[in-house]
Amino acid sequence: MCPSKRNRNTLKSQSGSMIVMALFAIIVLALLAGTLVSMNQSSSNSVLYEVYGVRAKNAAKAGIQEVAMSSFPIGAGVGPQLCNQVINSSASFSTISGFQSCQFTARCTTRDINFNGEDYRYYRFSSTGSCGFDDVVVSRTVSVDAMQEN
């Protein structure tokens, strides 16, 4: 069985077209792979920001607790204190697992107010926690207000 002359001419005219199709497929697959790698990297970065954001929020909460504890000490006969102060995180805070690169700055302000003939002491607690990795710093701020009748 011999290929006819017409079939031979068709085969010669198609030679090389398979290479063009293969190159097209390879380029399309390479672009698709590059897009997937880029999406994976941006997803990893967003997870890092989320994790460090939660750590920064917890550091800020620790600052609120520390400044509130100094304003409302526990003990017999010890009442609420005036608390116009700023507290920075202690050195031992950075030894806690997960908070090695975190710190907080907590502030407390006190103001005496009169409302409807009653005297009150108004407390405003505010704390900013920040955590960093590489050249990125993530910070969160937490505020709490309290009022006590005098």
Image: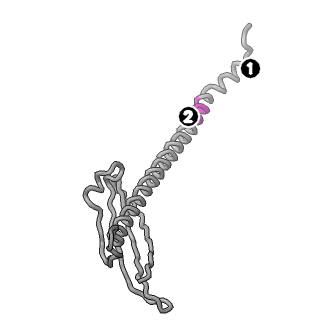
Identify the secondary structure beneath mark 2: helix
- Residue named by callout 2: 26
Q: Name the dominant secondary structure of the magenta segment.
A: helix
- Residue named by callout 1: 6
Q: x, y percentage for residue 24?
A: 59, 36
Residue displayed at 28% across by 51% down = 95
Q: Amino acid at mark 2?
A: Ile
Identify the secondary structure beneath mark 1: helix
Specify whether residue 55 is painted magenta. Answer: no
Decide which of tag 2 and tag 1 comes sooner along the chain: 1
Q: x, y percentage for residue 102?
A: 33, 57
Task: State the residue lying farthest toward the top.
Answer: 1
Scheme of image coloration: one colour
Task: State the residue lying farthest toward the front.
Answer: 76
Q: Nearer the viewer, mark 2 or mark 1?
A: 2
Q: Is residue 8 visible?
A: yes
Asked if residue 20 lies left or right of residue 103, the reply is right
Answer few, some or many: residues within 10 Å of disc 2's Cα (few below 14, many 20 plus, some between 14 and 19). few
The residues colored magenta run 19-26
Kindly indicate the quadrant of the structure image that contains residue 58: bottom left
Q: x, y percentage for residue 30?
A: 53, 38
